[in-house]
Each structure stands twice: as C-alpha cells, then as structure tokens.
Amino acid sequence: MRYETMIWSGCSMTMGNGMIEDNPPKDFTKSDAVIWKHPKFYELFPDVKTYGEAMEAVKQTTYPMLLGKKLGLKTYNLAIGGSGVEVQLKALTSFLLNTKIDYSKTLFCYQIPQLARVELLNNLNKPEIKMDEFTFYPFNGHLIDSTPDMKNFFINHFDFDYYTAKHLIRLVEYKGFLKSKGIDSIFFGEVNQLKYEEKTDEFIQNNMLNFNSWSHEDVKFPSWEALIKELDVKNPSKGHEITTLEQDGYGDDMHYSPNGHKQLADIYERFLKN
C-alpha cells in the first residue's frame, strides 16, 4: 500500500461510543476516575483508571485504529459522536490545515453519518463558566421536545430532506477539495439510508436553489443519483452482522462492541487490500 497516513471520520459508531459513561453526575476532567457503562469494561480494561486513559483505550479499540495497525499506517480517528457532516468536516479541515502530513500519501475514509443532523449554536441557558465559549446543542430527540428554542428551530426552520440534500452536495464538494489537495478518499455507508424520506427527487431538484426568482441561468440542483454517483459510496460490511455491545452482554447499547470493531477492521482490511 502506497499510503503512510490514514484518517477516519464519522459519528459514534466510528468513535467507539457506548463504553464510557458519557452522562456522568458532573462535568469530568481527564484526570477524574472513569465510570464505565457496564461492569464488564472494568474487567476488559483493568489498568485504566481515569477518563483520559479510558478515552485512549477506547480509541485504540475502534476499528480505524485496529485497521491502521493491520495496514502499518499512521492512523487518526477524528470521529465525533452525536454529530453530523458540518461538525465532522470542519474538524477534518482544521486537522489537515494544522497537521504536517504528506497529502499524496494520505487516505481519508468517511463513515457517512445520518445526513439530517445539523449544527446548532447554543446562546441561551448557558452556565456562567461557559459564557465565553461557543457551545452547541446535541442532536437529540428528547432535548428537542423539552427545549423551546430548539423546538422552534425544528418546527419553523428545519426539513429532513432539505438537509439530506444539502449535506449530500457538501460531501461531493468536499471530495473535490480532498482531491485538489492530492488526498484519496473513500466514503462508506448504506446508500438506502441516504435517500430523501418525503420529498421526491424532482421536488428537491426544483426547490433547493429557490433563493431568488431572478437569475441569469436556469440551474437545477443535481439529481440524487448524480450525487451518489459522484460520491461512489462503498459498503463492504453489507451482509455481515457486526456484533453490538448488547449482543456481547454489555447492557442494551447498540453501538459496536470491541469484538464488533475487530470484525470491521478485518472487513475493511480485505476491502482495502483488494
């Protein structure tokens, strides 16, 4: 393999969520004693004592890091749980512009998240300690119902299919950005999960560019098939049952278990070598 560096991004499935307790009774620091989500993790990671150590242990358990070891590549896992395209690509661009790597020897792999996830800045109800920081709302269903300003946004300014289309074309644009830098990229996901839910493809094509009725050229938004063709989405894990935390006896969490991450590393290793 001609690559030296591999970068992954995605959501909680790639980050390795579900092992560490992410809703502790207080804001934790990396030096605080770790709280695992299930007693079996204390047995799996007996020498891990703090949240900082636990984050590193979980990272090394994730399939991108296991895959990197198999392929002999310097690997970075930039996945961000609970987030979407906007957040993840912003983090990736920041990493690329701040990190000295040989772009021509770099492979970027992206686990496409749920496309309708949006980045919402929170300027209300912030604790005093956070007043001088940007804080963001997590994309969480029960918070939408219980938070008036979030509910207002989703009722009045949100449409699932609009954001799906918006983020699909953003991914196409970003693939071109990576290519301009000499970075090879592969986008992974289940194509059927990237489809519009209610709007027709014709509606999306005719309405995504409705910013001004006056324009010099009649431009339509690309068809869904055209966007998917540009992305060339791969799904090497299709047909494989990847083990979840629930299936391996770690509670009722549906994220991948450590064994599931090992399975995925093996699948992606075969895919990339072929």
Image (cartoon, grey):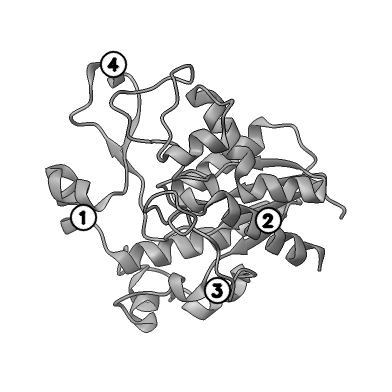
Residue at 65% across, 70% down: 236
1 vs 2, front mark: 2
Residue 12: where, in percent of width, then height? 47, 49
Q: Which image quadrant is residue 159 in?
A: bottom left
Q: Which residue is mark 3?
A: 228
Are there few (<14), some (14-19), or many (20+) residues within 10 Å of tag 3?
A: some
4 vs 3, front mark: 4
Relative placement, left or right, of 106 versus 82 is right
- Residue 154 bears which disc, if any? 1
Real-space Cα distance between discs 2 and 3? 25 Å
Real-space Cα distance between discs 1 and 4? 28 Å
Is residue 94 shown to the viewer in this render? no
Q: Which residue is mark 2?
A: 265
- Residue 129 bears which disc, if any? 4
Q: Quadrant of the C terminus?
A: bottom right
Relative placement, left or right, of 8 versus 256 is right
Q: Earlier in the sequence, mark 4 or mark 2?
A: 4
What amino acid is at disc 1? Phe
Real-space Cα distance between discs 3 and 1? 26 Å
